[in-house]
């Protein structure tokens, strides 16, 4: 245990010393409605850590009181997260649903005590009656029901006689309480939904505030540790246990500050949106802040736990810099992973005065890492180096290979450039070089001075791999939603090269690819035929550089400097050049594109060229831009334009189908996927799959009538003033038609029918 104690441990020690508890029992009570994220890791670290430190135990309890959002896959993800972080709940795994009968009995007891009543106000009325921070609330007229009436109604609620929302069970506390949570809070609500564990046994489910404290009590929890947003709920927690006069020892709630990290979202709703909108590949996408995501990316449990320990346990909310988490993984991997060479953008070098082949001994670890191990690196006449490690006209301070500057091959010989081979367009194809036989690293007697060493690989023995360069998912320090996604959060390199030892020797699953960062074998997509490596993190924090304003060159005028500053975009390494700026202005001012779409197009020559080809065929700038930036750009990350199975004509045809109302934008994504795979025309795909949008009111009207007939409660709520439910009915119609119904037509017809 750490020498310095946080306020939670101080409280635990006081309770042990006073004899309040004989055993410390904590609990980790997540809702199984999403994958656990880094914030859950902090809670796991605290609850399991305190139990371990004081020889107690921590229960893993699934708070499964909302059947509409929970699933077994989330339960398994939560269990996997706890185990991966190194904790064990033993036999102490529970579900709130295990206690449904007992919690119901407690509700009956409160009614008999005159402390709870069945209310029949609508959801809107309950909200209205609650009052405000400055004004007291008004108690429902139904609070005057007799104990017998309340008991009868609760039992009938349990037996399924009422519809969702028709009745609720409320505590009778104080409608003028300063803490608005205490203004007759809800204890039970009706939910006719299938529960993943209890099936259809129950159609009423306890609210969190009622189930939480009672579940803690039933399990014998001593310290119920919550995040700070539940501070006001503590009064309900105590009220329920006090009013029921439950015997001691009983649990008490304490709160700590939840984890907030910049450039990150941890709202389950927003994370689910990322998954459902396919902005990521799933809950375990390596860019996601889920534990599954960090695990797949290559983070170690030690780095996560070290991060949790470093940030500490505070009483006030604050924002943690994500670079602190990145430091923890670098710090952990730096001490343990082997160093190897990798070439991401290969440039061929032929060493003309070298014949034959040999192997060069090289250690996997630098001298300051307490690990041993080495490999043999093949060396031959033909090698590959990084394209950026050679420049014909280098700037001052460039110390790699140039026509006039030799360089050392890492662990190997010094080479110098003799000739540069180019194609007809002036692109460099190959470097002809010579090596110095007596310059081998470790036994150099050449007397040649060089200022740097570069990565290289023998052409014949190098292994081809796929590299996934992951970066932060959001470009904004305080992301609000999908609009803040970093378009460069993933770059895929299909034909990178690594040393043969990486693949053949299988010394580790994590490596430092020198000068590139730390990498991990993707546990899902990697195979012997196609090895895939995820970049865990770079060797240093490069993000700070990306968000700094790039200094303009000395020759620029004051006016140019102003223009450069105006076009600087957060998360982009360089300011736009004049040509890009002109495109940007054209897109925003003349074509009406938003700044983010314009920025992406202006900076990417291939995309802007493709977009212009489309514009020449169809004057629909916004629709075309959205299609090019979101769909075409994804294909161009992996292919050249010449390799695409579609042309600008196909994209124009697809966008025209959207603009003409023949298909919806949602269906267009499905059509594009098929188009990218087989190159069929969009019209052909739409006809073959029967994807034509339904716009005929005579076809849509009966579907709307059916949806309205199935949802009388929501119809009543809508007519009572809850106009937000319009979206519910539209969504149900679209769902029924598989997304084929024209949303504009559906909106209009639904609004007319609900008048």
Image (cartoon, rainbow, N blue to C red):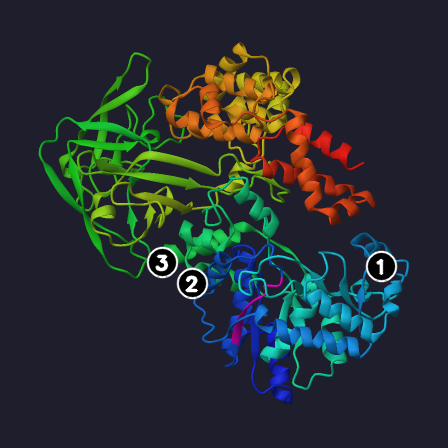
Cα gap from disc 2 to disc 1, whole angstroms:
44 Å
Q: Residue at x 43, y 25 (%)?
A: 675
Q: Is residue 74 magenta?
A: no
Image-based side of 265 in relation to 248, left or right: left
| Residue placed most toward the observer, 736 or 496 | 736
**Secondary structure category for the residue under label 3:** loop
Q: Label 3, on which residue?
A: 335
Q: 114 left or right of 464? A: right
Is mark 3 in CB contact (under 8 Å) with mark 2? no
Classify mark 3: residues with Cα within 10 Å, few (<14), some (14-19) or many (20+): some
Q: Position of residue 274 (x, y in %)?
A: 55, 43
Residue 193 in percent (x, y) is at 61, 57
Front residue of 670 and 628: 670
Determine the image quadrant of residue 382: top left
Identify the secondary structure beneath mark 2: helix
- Residue at horizontal 48%, vertical 39%? 489
Whichever of callouts 1 and 3 sits on the residue coming sooner in the sequence is 1
Main SS category, magenta section: strand
> Can you say whether 201 is above or below 280 in the image?
below
Tell me if label 1 and label 3 are in contact, CB under 8 Å: no
Q: Nearer the viewer, residue 181 or 453?
A: 181
Q: Earlier in the sequence, mark 3 or mark 2?
A: 2
Report crowding for label 2: few under 14, some 14 to 19, many 20 or more residues within 10 A (C-alpha): some
Residue pointed to by mark 2:
84
Packing grade of label 1 (10 A; few <14, some 14-19, many >=20) is many
Single out the residue that lies furthest toward the bottom.
Answer: 19
Q: Report the span colored magenta.
A: 58-65
Between marks 3 and 2, how big is the CA–CA gap?
Answer: 21 Å
Could you tell me which residue is drawn at 51 percent across and 78 percent down? 57
What mark, if any, has residue 130 been given in the picture?
Answer: 1
Res. 748 mark: none
């Amino acid at each position: 245990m750490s020498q310095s104690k946080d306020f939670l441990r101080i409280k635990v020690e006081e309770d042990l010393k006073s004899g309040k508890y004989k055993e410390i029992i904590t609990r980790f009570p997540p809702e199984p409605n999403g994958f656990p994220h880094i914030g859950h890791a902090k809670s796991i670290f605290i609850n399991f850590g305190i139990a371990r430190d004081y020889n107690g135990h921590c229960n893993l309890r699934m708070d499964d009181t909302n059947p509409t959002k929970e699933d077994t896959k989330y339960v398994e993800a939560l269990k996997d997260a706890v185990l991966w972080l190194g904790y064990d709940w033993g036999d102490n795994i529970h579900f709130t649903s295990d206690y449904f009968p007992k919690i119901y009995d407690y509700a009956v007891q409160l009614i008999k005590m005159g402390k709870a009543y069945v209310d029949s106000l609508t959801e809107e009325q309950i909200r209205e009656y609650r009052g405000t921070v400055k004004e007291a609330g008004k108690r429902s007229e139904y609070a005057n029901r007799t104990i017998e009436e309340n008991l009868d109604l609760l039992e009938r609620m349990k037996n399924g006689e009422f519809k969702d929302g028709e009745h609720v069970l409320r505590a009778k506390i104080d409608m003028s309480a300063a803490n608005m949570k205490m203004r007759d809070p809800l204890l039970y609500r009706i939910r006719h939904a299938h529960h993943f564990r209890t099936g259809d046994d129950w159609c009423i489910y306890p609210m969190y505030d009622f189930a939480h404290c009672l579940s803690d009590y039933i399990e014998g929890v001593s310290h119920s540790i919550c995040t700070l947003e539940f501070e006001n709920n503590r009064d309900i927690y105590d009220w329920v246990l006090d009013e029921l006069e439950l015997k001691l020892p009983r649990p008490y709630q304490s709160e700590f500050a939840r984890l907030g990290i910049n450039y990150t979202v941890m709202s389950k709703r927003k994370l689910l949106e990322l998954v459902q909108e396919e902005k990521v590949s799933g809950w375990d996408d390596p860019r996601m802040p889920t534990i599954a995501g960090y695990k797949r990316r290559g983070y170690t449990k030690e780095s996560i736990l070290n991060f949790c320990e470093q940030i500490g346990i505070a009483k006030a909310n604050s924002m943690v810099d994500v670079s602190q988490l990145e430091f923890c993984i670098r710090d952990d991997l730096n001490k343990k992973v082997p160093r190897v060479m990798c070439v991401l953008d290969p440039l061929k070098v032929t060493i003309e005065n070298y014949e034959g082949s040999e192997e060069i001994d090289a250690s996997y670890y630098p001298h300051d890492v307490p690990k041993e191990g080495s490999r043999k690196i093949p060396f031959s006449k033909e090698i590959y180096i990084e394209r950026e490690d050679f420049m014909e006209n280098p700037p001052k301070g460039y110390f790699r290979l140039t026509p006039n500057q030799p360089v050392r091959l890492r662990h190997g010989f010094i080479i110098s450039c003799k000739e540069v081979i180019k194609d007809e367009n002036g692109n460099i194809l190959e470097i002809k070089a010579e090596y110095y036989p007596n310059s081998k690293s470790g036994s150099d007697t050449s007397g040649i001075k060089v200022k740097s060493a570069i990565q290289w690989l023998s052409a014949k023995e190098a292994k081809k791999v796929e590299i996934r360069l992951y970066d932060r998912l959001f470009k904004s320090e305080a992301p609000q939603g999908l609009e803040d996604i970093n378009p460069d959060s993933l770059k895929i390199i299909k034909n990178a090269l690594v040393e043969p030892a990486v693949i053949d020797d299988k010394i580790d699953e994590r490596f430092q690819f020198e000068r590139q960062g730390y990498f991990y074998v993707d546990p899902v997509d990697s195979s012997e035929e196609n090895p895939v490596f995820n970049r865990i993190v770079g060797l240093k924090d490069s993000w700070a550089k990306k968000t700094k304003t790039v200094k303009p060159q000395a020759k620029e005028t004051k006016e140019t400097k102003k223009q450069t500053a105006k076009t600087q975009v957060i998360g982009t390494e360089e300011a736009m050049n004049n040509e890009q700026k002109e495109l940007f202005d054209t897109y925003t001012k003349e074509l009406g594109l938003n700044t983010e779409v314009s920025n992406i197009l202006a900076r990417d020559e291939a995309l802007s060229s493709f977009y212009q080809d489309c514009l020449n065929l169809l004057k629909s700038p916004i629709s075309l831009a959205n299609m090019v930036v979101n769909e075409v750009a994804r294909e161009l990350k992996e292919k050249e334009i010449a390799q695409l199975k579609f042309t600008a004509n196909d994209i124009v045809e697809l966008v025209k189908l959207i603009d003409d109302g023949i298909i919806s934008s949602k269906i267009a994504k499905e059509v594009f996927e098929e188009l990218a795979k087989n190159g069929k025309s969009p019209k052909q795909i739409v006809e073959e799959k029967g994807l034509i949008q339904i716009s005929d009111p005579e076809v849509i009207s009966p579907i709307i009538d059916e949806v309205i007939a199935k949802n009388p409660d929501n119809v009543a709520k809508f007519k009572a003033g809850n106009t937000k439910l319009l979206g519910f009915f539209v969504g149900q119609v679209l769902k029924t038609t598989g997304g084929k119904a024209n949303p504009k037509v559906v909106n209009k017809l639904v609004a007319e029918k609900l008048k």
